């Protein structure tokens, strides 16, 4: 009964607010949406215009600026474009229009309705002509507009370039102009944001708008992949466990902590512009999936959800530290936590990777995910706490990790990820060292919140070190997974280890080059330097 009492009181308060607003002829009598979750996304829901100022972003914009940005992908002659708006007043239309320019004239090609939860709308246009560039614009009402360019598919280019970024910490709410200018100068064909675009856990819409305003000049004129990670969902760490309900925000028993409609809103805003899901069957609580593939210029990108089906550690394995996900004891037996029934990618995604790897074998193949498939750090946090193993990484469960790596290797693919706040390039080992795929975990955009270090306790290089950095070579991580470390960027380095990755796919040479650029460098200068140890070139077999 209390639940219904609070709901009635909330509606009455909103009604009174609307009456006060209507008395000044500001809005119509149509009541605002009552969000299905309480105390979440408050900056952008209900009578949002009555909210006091907040530290994230001012959502009370002039009405000719109500369209924040557009973000799109183009795959198999189908355009998917999401329009992201600032919150709308009750009397404003929920309709947005998409136009393209043909022969100097703007032509409307589609209309869509804006969802009041998250304030986004997605256009899906089939039979798109991918052989030409098209200017587009999104319109709302009489004045608001956002313009950009739908690029033609660069299939004739010999080199396809991907910019990869992750971890846009709210410890720095300033602009991202240096990174944006650098990336636009380097002019990649595709941009990938691997997760943690938002660090304001219960205010995703405001934080997503902030992210978009920081980076929209990167994806205004080129395709872009964004996938949510733990902080986007409102959790410090995340083991999705097929959509079950988590009991605490820590989430270590598995599942999602916040209301499923909030989760769906996050995914709608961040992923609805991706190509159609390979298998759209929802998981528990009606939460959707988005894993799919995207072909750009003859490079085939598998976009996976490496945490959504993953088992949570709490109550399932022996606890070997102060937290269920942290192992401090170097003498524990890793086999004791690699138990039957534990999942990493889950059966559905494994089937997807298997099918994807067997198709389009003439293409260079790349797997894009949230985090890396090993324990690639030794020291964690400001106090440089040494963890023997971190179950938040995809080095655990080991059997699931090896299944995933076998399929990535079978596809002759490389792996790009983020999350770790520590840039690394490794070649995985499955049964033997170097028998697995290469992986590049890119640095954090901002790295002054939670840093990590690659720092072997004996401070010695591994076997077969290339000698470029002190601690390269063959190592076992805390789960006894075999990895060969080729480069790492500890935060004591330039720009505090913050920056972004640039990956170049040289199609005619079957070669991939990993570049890693500091956040504060100006790449237009001829003497601009990458992080030490980069670039790294590898040949695909």
Image (spheres, rainbow, N blue to C red):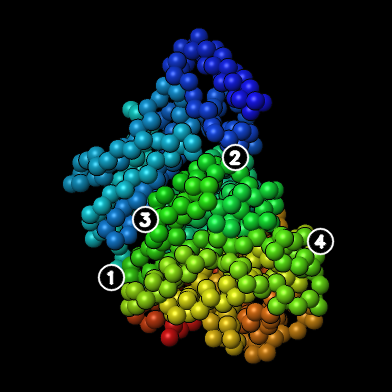
The residue wearing badge 2 is: 203
Disc 3 to disc 1, how far (Cα)? Answer: 25 Å
- Residue lying farthest to the bottom in this orientation: 464
Quarter of the image with the C terminus is bottom left
In the image, residue 216 above or below residue 92: below
Disc 2 to disc 3, how far (Cα)? Answer: 27 Å
Q: Seen in the image, is 336 located left or right of residue 310?
A: right
For the residue labelled by badge 3, is the local secondary structure a helix, a strand or a loop?
loop
Q: Nearer the viewer, mark 3 or mark 1?
A: 3
Name the residue located 46 percent from the left edge and 64 percent from the top edge: 348
N-terminal of the two: label 4 or label 3? 3
For the residue labelled by badge 2, is the local secondary structure a helix, a strand or a loop?
loop
Name the residue located 32 percent from the left edge and 60 percent from the top edge: 75
Q: Confirm whether residue 285 shows in the render.
A: yes
The residue wearing badge 4 is: 322
The residue wearing badge 1 is: 156
The residue wearing badge 3 is: 276
Disc 2 to disc 4, how far (Cα)? Answer: 30 Å
- Residue lying farthest to the top in this orientation: 23
N-terminal of the two: label 2 or label 3? 2
């Amino acid at each position: 009964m209390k639940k219904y009492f609070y709901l009635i009181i909330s509606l009455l308060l909103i009604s009174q607010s609307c009456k006060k607003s209507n008395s000044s002829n500001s809005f119509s009598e149509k009541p605002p949406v009552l969000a299905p979750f309480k105390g979440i996304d408050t900056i952008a829901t209900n009578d949002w215009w009555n909210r006091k100022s907040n530290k994230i972003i001012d959502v009370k914009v002039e009405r000719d600026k109500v369209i924040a940005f557009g973000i799109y992908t183009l795959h198999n002659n189908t355009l998917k474009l999401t329009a992201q708006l600032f919150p709308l007043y009750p009397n404003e239309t929920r309709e947005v229009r998409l136009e393209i320019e043909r022969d100097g004239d703007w032509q409307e090609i589609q209309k869509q309705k804006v969802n009041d939860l998250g304030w986004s709308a997605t256009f899906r246009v089939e039979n798109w002509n991918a052989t030409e560039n098209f200017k587009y614009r999104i319109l709302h009402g009489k004045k608001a507009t956002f313009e950009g360019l739908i690029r033609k598919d660069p299939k004739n280019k010999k080199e396809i370039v991907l910019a990869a970024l992750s971890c846009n910490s709210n410890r720095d709410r300033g602009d991202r102009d240096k990174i944006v200018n650098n990336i636009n100068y380097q002019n990649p064909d595709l941009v990938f944001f691997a997760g943690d675009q938002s660090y304001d856990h219960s205010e995703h819409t405001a934080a997503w708008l902030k992210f978009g305003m920081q980076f929209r000049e990167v994806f205004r004129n080129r395709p872009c992949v964004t996938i949510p990670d733990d902080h986007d969902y409102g959790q410090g760490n995340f083991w999705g466990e097929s959509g079950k309900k988590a009991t605490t925000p820590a989430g270590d028993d598995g599942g999602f902590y916040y209301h499923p409609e909030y989760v769906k809103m996050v995914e709608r805003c961040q992923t609805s512009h991706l190509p159609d899901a390979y298998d759209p069957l929802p998981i528990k609580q009606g939460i959707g999936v988005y894993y799919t593939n995207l072909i750009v210029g003859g490079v085939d990108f598998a976009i996976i959800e490496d945490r959504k089906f993953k088992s949570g550690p709490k109550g399932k394995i022996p606890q070997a530290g102060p937290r269920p996900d942290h192992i401090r004891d170097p003498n524990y037996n890793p086999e004791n936590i690699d138990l039957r029934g534990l999942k990493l990618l889950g059966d559905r995604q494994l089937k997807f990777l298997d099918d994807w790897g067997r198709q389009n074998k003439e293409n260079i193949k790349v797997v894009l995910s949230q985090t890396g498939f090993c324990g690639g750090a030794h020291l964690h946090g400001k106090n440089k706490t040494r963890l023997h193993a971190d179950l938040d990484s995809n080095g655990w469960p080991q059997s699931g990790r090896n299944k995933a790596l076998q399929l990535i290797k079978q596809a002759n693919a490389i792996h790009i990820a983020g999350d770790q706040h520590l840039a690394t390039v490794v070649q995985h080992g499955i049964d033997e060292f170097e028998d697995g795929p290469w992986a590049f975990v890119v640095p954090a955009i901002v790295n002054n919140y939670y840093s990590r270090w690659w720092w072997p306790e004996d401070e010695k290089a591994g076997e077969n070190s290339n000698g470029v950095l002190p601690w390269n070579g063959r190592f076992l991580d805390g789960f006894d997974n075999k990895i060969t470390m080729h480069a790492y960027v500890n935060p004591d380095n330039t720009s505090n280890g913050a920056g972004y990755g640039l990956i170049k796919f040289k199609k005619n040479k079957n070669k991939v080059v990993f570049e890693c650029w500091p956040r504060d460098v100006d790449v237009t200068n001829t003497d601009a330097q990458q992080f030490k140890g980069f670039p790294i070139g590898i040949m695909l077999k």
